[in-house]
Amino acid sequence: MYLVGFPLLLIPLALYNIIAFLFGLGFGDTVFTVPMMSGATLSVSTGDLLIILSILLLFVEILKATRFGVKSIVDHLLSFVVFVVALGEFLMVQQAATSTFLLFLVICAIDVVGGFSISIRAAARDYTVDGTHPIAH
């Protein structure tokens, strides 16, 4: 079941702000470590977890982009609003001037550009008359 009209990348944006403003944690703080077979220890930070969550949600957003219809357009517009808000926060808020937020901003941009381009291709593919493709003419 898809969440229609809800930009999923709003979740990591909200989590970032909660972590940065309410808890005051650093995004480089280690949350847990994983011993590797090589003998090395992998340290996973708060920022790493936020980016992992963002990438997983980006995958779901790209799946949602394959739908066609008015609800899909609204979903894309809301994703664009999340990107604009994140860009504004990145440029104007001191706590957002981190590499974690920059990576999140790139993920939001991929969501917007990828979502619109996939939807346009899906719409062009779905719009055929008598087996001919009207855009190809």
Image (spheres, helix red, strand yellow):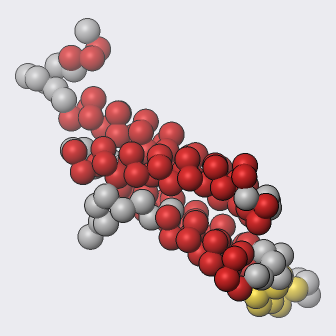
Q: Is residue 95 visible?
A: yes
* 20 over 63 or under it: above or below: below
Query: Where does the image place residue 103, in percent across and percent down from the top left?
Result: 70, 56
Q: Residue at x 30, y 66 (%)?
A: 2
Q: Quadrant of residue 30?
A: bottom right
Q: Nearer the viewer, residue 49 or 39?
A: 49
Vertical placement of 25 versus 105: above or below? Answer: below
Number of numbered discs: 0
Residue at left offset 80%, top offset 89%: 33
Can residue 103 be seen from the camera position used here?
no
Residue at 35%, 40% (x, y): give it. Answer: 119
Where in the figure is residue 122, as x and y percent of width and height?
30, 38
Name the residue rendered at 81%, 78% in the picture.
26
47 displayed left or right of 77: right
In the image, farthest residue toward the left:
130
Res 37 → quadrant = bottom right
Q: Quadrant of the N terminus?
A: bottom left
Q: Quadrant of residue 94?
A: bottom right
Q: In the rendered image, which quarter contains the C terminus?
A: top left
Which of 108/64 is in front?
A: 108
- The spot of residue 55 in percent (x, y) is 58, 63
Q: Is residue 111 left or right of residue 45?
A: left
Q: Residue furthest right?
A: 39
Q: Position of residue 124 (x, y in %)?
A: 27, 29
